[in-house]
Structures are given as structure tokens and as C-alpha cells.
Amino acid sequence: MTANDNMEFAQRIDDAVRPISDAVSSVIFYSVDLFGVSLPLVVVWLITAATIFTLSLRFINITGFGHALALVSGRRTHHLKGGDGEISHFQALSSALSGTVGLGNIASVPVAIALGGPGAVFWMILAGFLGMSSKFAECALAVKYRRVQPDGRIIGGPMYYIEEVFRRRGMKTLGKGAAIFFAVMAMGGSISLFQVNQSYAQFSAVTGVEAPLAFGVIMCSLVAAVILGGIKRIGFVSGILVPLMGVLYLGAGIVIIALNIESLPKAIGVIFSSAFGLDAAGGGLVGALINGIKRATYSNEAGIGSSAIAHSAVKTSEPMTEGFVASLEPFIDTIIVCTITALVVIITGAYEPYLYNPDVRGIQITSAAFASAFSWFPIILLIASILFAFTTLVSWAFYGAQAAAYIFGPSKRVDVLFKLALCLLLSTGAAISLSSIIDFIDSMLFGMCIPNIIALYLLLPELKRDLAEYNRKHRSVVSA
């Protein structure tokens, strides 16, 4: 099949799927106009929940930060004995981070800056800070309500506490339906064609090699080799790759910032002044706020419930411990990784030619920012983008498989068939760019937050009691 044949085939699929995609997107991403800026209500739903959880849990994102670090490092786990699970706190965090630290950190942040101005970074960081509380809530509850199979495997995720909280209120059928809805959305969200497509785009741009199908097949074959080994292999690989790609990408970003250190104070000043500015371009304060919150939400997925599936596999006897560990995820993903990207883009001025351009492509801005330091720096970005894409594909394949296990039963056959079918589908992602399918998948991903947050609200009193009991039993540990 020639390149033209590929394009024609892709266009036919795109045309066929577009009406369905538009219909679903119009519901999930229903937007209202706010001072000339489009505001998706799903973003309001997520950031409102994050704020309520932060206040209700008495700023657990601050008070529990030190304990979270101690748990991940293994320095404060002597009070934990026994417990089910398959992976360590560090591996659970790495597995979840591998699903959120992806191309969104590279491509979405420049888009927020281009559309909302540098002030979007301030609101992005604030949204990440509040999202730490959402992560605490959903991941602690996912561990509490997980299921342990006879062979020791863990099946977990929001679908189990969604079903249970409705059942207790005499709404068993509604709870089952809401949990199935979540699982179906998770299965759809696992079809991460965007990750394959964008990593290939950077590969082709840097190397000049045009082999989309071969690229997709090789990447997804490697993904299959990891995910077919189960959560233990995923945790092991993520525990190696996540720190590696973090050091690689953040190290490159820090080098660029260091080379332009004299511009750092000005960049920080621009972020703050723009965050509260009234410049009509880009929507002023409102545009900065909306774009910053949108990109943070899209990046760390706090409230969507995806990461809770990975965290539910942790080996612990205390569900609250994984809530503390999970709260580090938005901190690392948004407050550290996204902020480094933002500073590089602002310091180098790479975003300025694209400012307030609705057709901006974020990966172009980031690549230009990296190239401003050394001509070969886009190669570093290429390696980072492929690693980011790979680990995201691995994590989301696991999420989709767990969702399939909830619907069809936790058999080995269901698990293997789903993973193989998913990898086969993903392998075509570099060869075709189907905007309607990507929009549809994004809609399914964000559809997960609707039943998830409703269940979190209903379980919030129980969560607060469990946290108080944990603090009472381990007060000396938590305060350490």
C-alpha cells in the first residue's frame, strides 16, 4: 500500500467515524463561553472535585508530603506488615507515572502557553497541586476495594468502589451500570494512537526515515513483551524507565535553563504578571486560567481514576499508604516535569511565533526550544518522546486489560486476547492519523471521571474516617 493509499484509506475511516466522534465529544466536552474563551464543563467538574478533596482532607497534599516521600523510599514502612499485592510503593508510583508522564508533558504545555499566554503556567501548577488530593482519594479507595484472585493476582480500580458505594445505597443496578460505563471508557482510553503517532512524527522529523508501519509494529511488539508479563513486569520496567526518562528529559531542560539563567527571573515574572493580567489577547486572565487548568488536568489525569488501577496492585496492609504515595504523582508530573517544559519554552521564546494561534502544534514549539541550545538537542527530545510514548502505552494497556477483566471476568484468556488485540490496533497508529478517532478516544478517557468523582463524593466521609484512624495508629510515623 502506497503513502497515497494510506492517506485515502485513513480519510475514509475518518469520514465514517467523524459523526459518532463529534456526537460523543459534544457531550463529554460540552463547553460554555466565558469571556470569549471556551470552557469545557468536564474541566470544571475535575478542578472543583480537586478543590473539595483538598479542603475536606485538610490539605493532605501538604501535610502528607513528607510521609509520601518516606513511603516511596522505604524509610517508613516498618509499621506495615503483611498485606496483599504484587508490587512495591515505588513500582506502583512508577507504573502510574508511566501512564501520565507522556507526550502531554512535551506537547500540551507549549499549547497552554501559546493559547493562554505564559500565565497559564501558574494555573497549571495550581491545578496540579489541587490534583494531588484527588489522587490521594481515588488511589487509597482503589486499594481498599480491590479484589484478590486465588492465584494472588490483584484486580482493582475505581469500578469496584463505584459498584460498592451504590450497592450500599440500594442502587445495585445503577452502581453496576456506572462501573461498567467506567470500564468501557477505560478500554476505549487505552487505544493511545496519539502516543504512537506523535512519537513517530518526531522520529521522522529528526532522522528523515519514513517507515510508519515498521515503527508502529516494533514499538507495539515491545509493548506486548512487557504487558503480557503482568503488573510485576510492568512495575519492574517502569521502575527503570520512568527514572531514566525523567533524568534524561529534565536534565536536558535544566541545561537549557542554566544556559539562559539570566532570563529566568524575567520568565518567572512574566508567568505571574500574565496569570493575573487583563490583556484581551488569548482571553487575558480567564484564558490563562482555563488553558492552564485544562492542560494540567489532561496531563496528570487526577480525578479520572486511571492511575488508581495501577496503584491498586501495591503490596500493603494499609490502603491509606497508597493514597499518600499517589499524591506525589501530580507533583512530579505537573509541578516538576510540566514546569521545566514551560520554563524552557518561555526562556527561549520558542512560543512567541505561535502565540494565540489556535492551530499550534506543541511538539514543534518544544523541539524549537531544545534546538535553541544545541542543534542536536532535538535528538534528546526524540529519545525522551519515544520513552514517554512507550511507557504510556504500557500503562494504558494494563488499565484497559483490568477494565476488560471487570466486564468479561478475570481470566488469563481475556487478559491475553485483549492485550494482543490492543497492540495490533496500536501498531497502525504511526501509519495513519485519524483525528476523529483520537477525539473519540479522548472523550472516552474523560468520560471516566463522571462516575468516578460521583463515587468519590459518596465515599468521602468514609475516607476521612479511614485517614483519621490511620493517623491515630501511626501518628508518629506520619509526622516524621
Image (spheres, helix red, strand yellow):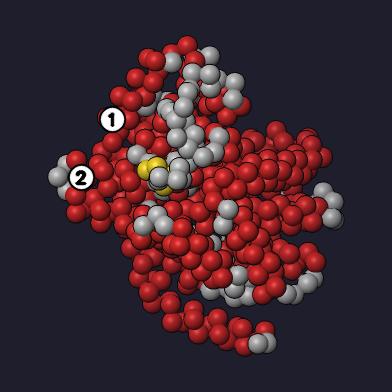
- Which secondary structure, mark 1? helix
Residue depicted at 47% across the width and 72% down the height = 436
Residue depicted at 74% across the width and 57% down the height = 382
Residue 23 in picture, x, y percent from top left: 35, 70
Q: Is residue 126 above or below residue 187?
A: above
Q: Which mark is residue 142?
A: none
Between residues 155 and 356, which one lies in front from this camera angle?
155
Q: Residues within 10 Å of mark 2 (few under 14, many from 20)?
A: some
Q: Amino acid at mark 1?
A: Glu
Quarter of image, res 108: bottom right
Residue 339 in picture, x, y percent from top left: 62, 40
Q: How many marks?
A: 2
Q: Is residue 133 above or below residue 47?
A: above
Which residue position is annotated with label 2? Answer: 167
Give the Cα separation between the discs numbered 2 and 1: 15 Å
N-terminal of the pair, mark 2 or mark 1, is 2
Residue 338 visible from this viewpoint: no
Q: Would you say 120 lies left or right of 170 here?
A: right
- Which secondary structure, mark 2? helix
Residue 43 in picture, x, y percent from top left: 40, 49
Q: Is residue 164 above or below residue 30?
A: above
Q: Amino acid at mark 2?
A: Arg
Residue depicted at 40% across the width and 45% down the height = 150
Between residues 337 and 276, which one lies in front from this camera angle?
337
Q: Would you say 310 lies left or right of 429 here?
A: left
Q: Is the Cβ of the residue at disc 2 closer than 8 Å to that at disc 1?
A: no
Q: Which mark is residue 462?
A: 1
Quarter of the image that includes the N terminus: bottom right
Q: Residues within 10 Å of mark 1 (few under 14, many from 20)?
A: few
